[in-house]
Amino acid sequence: MSCRLQIFGAVLLIAVTTRAAADSGTHAPAPFDQNAAIAYSQAAIGRTLGDFSFLDTQHRIVRLSDYRGKPLVVNMVFTACADSCPIVVQTLRKAVDVAQDAVGEDAFSVVTIGFDARDDTPERMRAFAHSQGVDLSNWNFLSGDAVAIEGLVENLGFIYYPSPRGFDHLAQTTVLDAEGRVYRQVYGAQFNAPALVEPLIDLVFDRPTESGTLANLVNRIRLFCTYYDPTRERYRFDYSIFIAVAVGAGSLIGVGVILVRAWLRARPDARNA
């Protein structure tokens, strides 16, 4: 699908020099260029994240392993960001709304994690979530210490640099599978909803662990019959295939009845009766 080519039209929000990267000890290959940045990020696909600990906005400990069992969407921000981070979160908010409608409200989870370990406190993350109008039961805003953040961004292939405006960073949203492995990277401060929803559909509706079960059959039918309507910016379930099957089956039954009746009338015992 065209949305799966999103990575090749990536929008990278990075404006730094190679010297600044070398001085700051950041997480990108050097020398920096767009192709290298995408390659670094794409290399994380298939990688299982470490079980890092964070704090939610109520100072409760949250571990990444707490989210195992269903897909997880990970979004990195810093709360002092005045431009790209709010745009990313607003774009993600719209895509999450579409995804919930397509696969179910409880089918996946979302975490937004502040990568500025010094300033992105639980209070700052709570205020940031409020300012973005995000209040969903399956979406948490988390803070971490420097060790957890450094480990996480390396696992994710996420790139950021200190800059005069705070940080410049890769605009990246990561989709993990139910086992905590990186499944897809979505790039850009703004992206179309299918770029996020399609991998979630893959993960939610095509579960190999349920192979042969009724639940798996239902999921595969939903996967086959669900399509994105760009005019409504929503996924819709296409009932036309079932109508066509019903009409076809009815026609076959009708033809069968006619043939059986004709055969019964043509039998010798029927003519002699």
Image: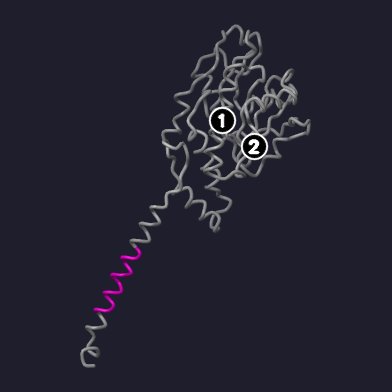
Q: Which mark is residue 184?
A: none
Q: Amino acid at mark 2?
A: Leu
Mark 1 in CB contact with mark 2 (< 8 angstroms): no
Of marks 1 and 2, which one's residue comes earlier in the chain? 1
Q: Quadrant of the N terminus?
A: top left
Q: Nearer the viewer, residue 261 or 46?
A: 261
Residue 48 percent location from the top left of the image = 63, 35
Q: Is residue 238 above or below residue 272?
A: above
Q: Quadrant of residue 94?
A: top right
Q: Which mark is residue 136?
A: 2
Looking at the rendered structure, the secondary structure element under dot 2 is loop
Residue 62 percent location from the top left of the image = 74, 35
Looking at the rendered structure, the secondary structure element under dot 1 is helix
Residue to which mark 1 is pinned: 92
Q: Residues within 10 Å of mark 2 (few under 14, many from 20)?
A: few
Magenta residues, start to end: 249-262
Q: Residue at x 54, y 54 (%)?
A: 216
What colouring style does the render use? one colour
Q: Nearer the viewer, residue 3 or 8?
A: 3
Q: Is residue 59 above or below residue 256?
A: above
Q: Residue at x 48, y 47 (%)?
A: 223
253 in magenta: yes
Q: Quadrant of residue 203?
A: top right
